[in-house]
Image (cartoon, helix red, strand yellow):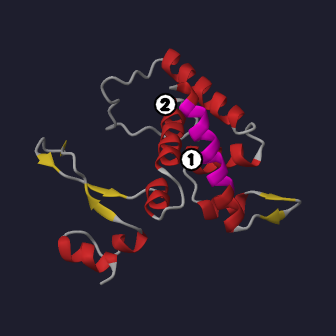
Amino acid sequence: MKASLFLAALDATLPPERLTHGRVERSRETVADSAGRIGRPYVAEGLLGMLERRGQIGRAQRLAGEQFAEWFRLAQLDPLRAADIGQRIPSGRSATGLAIEHARRRVNAALDACGGISSPCGCAAWYVLGLELTVAEFARREGWSGRAMRHETAKHLLFGALSVLAAHYGKDR
C-alpha cells in the first residue's frame, strides 16, 4: 500500500490533496489551539528530514542544517513581509537587537565556513536552508554563464554545505 494511502487510512480528516506533497503526521507534542484546548497538529516532513530518512545525509548534517535555519530565522534575514499579528514570540527567545545581531554573526560565520555567500555551497545554504527555497527552485535561480544549474548539481551543493556546516557546528560545541 502506498504511504499516502496508509496515512489517509489512519486519519480521514487530513485532506487527500495534502498527502500528495510528502509525509504528514500528527505531532508528538501537544499545543494549545485557538480556543485554548489541547491539540495535536499535523507536521509535514521537511527537506532535511526526508533526505535523512532516505539515507542521503546523516543525522549530523540534518542537525547542522536545522541549526543554520534556526539562526537564519532569529537573524531575521528573510525577505521583508508583513508580520503576523497573531504570532507570538516563543518564551525564552529574545527578539532584542542584541539577539538578532548575535544570530547574524552566527549565520555569517557559518557562511564563511562554506566559502562565503558567493561560493556555491554558501549560496546553497543561504537559499535552500535559510530562505527555504526548494532544491529545484534554487537550481532554476542559480547557474553559471547564463545556463541553469542541473537539479543534481544543486542537490550536491546542498550536501556539501551540510557537510561543512556539520563540521563547523561540531567545532562550536
> Relative to 74, is 40 above or below?
below
Is residue 70 covered in magenta? Answer: no
Looking at the picture, how far across and down is residue 83, in whole percent? 44, 37
Is the magenta region chiefly helix, strand or loop? Answer: helix
- Inspect the image, locate mark 1, and give the three-letter code of the amino acid beneath it: Leu
Q: Residue at x 70, y 47 (%)?
A: 121
Residue stretch rendered in magenta on the structure: 157-170
Q: Which residue is mark 2?
A: 74
Looking at the picture, how far across and down is residue 171, in whole percent? 57, 28
Looking at the picture, how far across and down is residue 31, in whole percent? 20, 43
- Can residue 12 be seen in this snapshot? no
**Is 158 left or right of 40, judged from the image as shown?**
right
Looking at the picture, how far across and down is residue 144, in whole percent? 84, 58
Q: Which residue is mark 1?
A: 129
- Inspect the image, locate mark 2, and give the three-letter code of the amino acid beneath it: Leu
Which numbered circle lies on residue 21? none
Of the 4 image quadrants, the one containing the N terminus is bottom left
Is label 1 or label 2 in front? 1
